[in-house]
């Protein structure tokens, strides 16, 4: 057990946990450099479809804005890049995930949210598990690692403590729930570069815009039980199967710790 009883109780009560340092300075430097190389097209091992630009640049790429400051997010890095894969497998992170999810752990996906300086846009309130209904049970735990200092000004994570206990909330009711001050008190989670927070898949969270001159890159690693059933469409599987150069039909999400289960993710 890595978490103290108090930390576990805090997570159970609040649905998130601000945590300490999980990446060293050399690891941070290497990940930032690799992210920049991918965003700027200096290396091409991440397929383009996993690189999304900020909306303002999608139809109108501006030559005077460096490409790295046009990118909104990059996904599936852990499946294509060994540095990001190593980050997702770091014992400092996975030990905590094991305390929260159990011993058999897979990575569903990852998102490097670039929140570029001057141009980073809002990520609106959401519950991750609601966006991913193709898993049974819908139990995800995420680790959000700050690659830069994350502050209120540059768009740190903001959570609604206890909102994981509401269960999945449809879009129709989201704003009604969030408008009830006795229910929803937003708490910003500022983090130093290299530290992280964990959040429950049903915890409501958002991040604000970044109009500061400082980048706010954050690596979101989304973990699931290895025993989870996947009801995703074949298209998605075969697409990833091809990219991962595994024979069709043998796709598995990345095993992080513990064992595989037949017929499961
Ligand atoms: O980093 C961000 O801007 C958003 C992250 C997020 O929504 C998540 O980790 O689920």
Image (cartoon, rainbow, N blue to C red):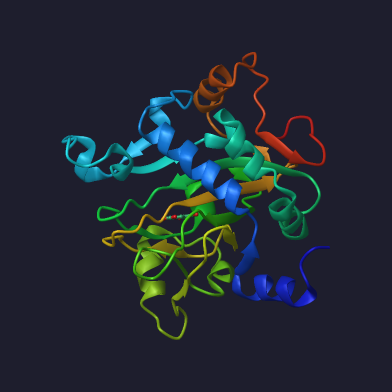
50 vs 163: above or below: above
**Residue 34 x/y as whole percent:** 49, 36
**Residue 120 x/y as whole percent:** 30, 54
Kindly identify the residue that appears in the image at 36 percent across and 52 percent down.
115
Kindly identify the residue that appears in the image at 70 percent across and 47 percent down.
90
Residue furthest front in the image: 26
190 vs 229: above or below: below
262 vs 175: above or below: above
- Front residue of this view, candidates 176 and 39: 39
Q: Left or right? Give the position of 180 relative to 99.
A: left
Question: Quadrant of the image for the C terminus?
Answer: top right
- Front residue of this view, candidates 197 and 109: 197
Residue furthest top in the image: 247
Question: Quadrant of the image for the N terminus?
Answer: bottom right
**Residue 180 x/y as whole percent:** 39, 81
Q: Left or right? Give the position of 233 relative to 74.
A: right
- Front residue of this view, candidates 41 and 181: 41
**Residue 55 x/y as whole percent:** 24, 44
Can residue 231 be seen by looking at this rendering?
A: no
């Amino acid at each position: 057990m890595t978490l103290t009883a108090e930390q576990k109780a805090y997570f159970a009560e609040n649905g998130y946990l601000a945590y300490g340092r999980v990446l060293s300075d050399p690891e941070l430097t290497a990940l930032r450099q690799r992210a920049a190389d991918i965003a700027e097209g200096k290396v091409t091992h991440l397929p383009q479809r996993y690189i999304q630009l900020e909306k303002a640049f999608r139809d109108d790429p501006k030559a005077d804005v460096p490409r790295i400051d046009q990118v909104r997010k990059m996904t599936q890095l852990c499946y294509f890049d060994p540095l990001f894969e190593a980050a997702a497998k770091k014992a400092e992170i996975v030990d905590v995930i094991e305390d929260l999810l159990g011993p058999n752990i897979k990575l569903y996906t990852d998102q490097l949210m670039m929140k570029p300086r001057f141009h980073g846009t809002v990520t609106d309130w959401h519950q991750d598990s609601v966006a991913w209904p193709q898993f049974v049970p819908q139990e995800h735990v995420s680790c959000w690692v700050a690659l830069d200092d994350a502050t209120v000004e540059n768009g740190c994570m903001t959570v609604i403590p206890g909102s994981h206990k509401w269960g999945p909330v449809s879009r129709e009711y989201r704003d009604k729930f969030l408008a009830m001050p006795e229910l929803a008190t937003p708490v910003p989670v500022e983090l130093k570069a290299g530290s992280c927070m964990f959040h429950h898949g049903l915890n409501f969270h958002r991040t604000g815009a970044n109009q500061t001159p400082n980048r706010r890159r954050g690596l979101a690693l989304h973990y699931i039980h290895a025993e989870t059933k996947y009801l995703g469409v074949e298209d998605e599987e075969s697409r990833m199967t091809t990219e991962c150069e595994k024979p069709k039909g043998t796709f598995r999400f990345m095993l992080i710790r513990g064992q595989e289960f037949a017929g499961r993710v």
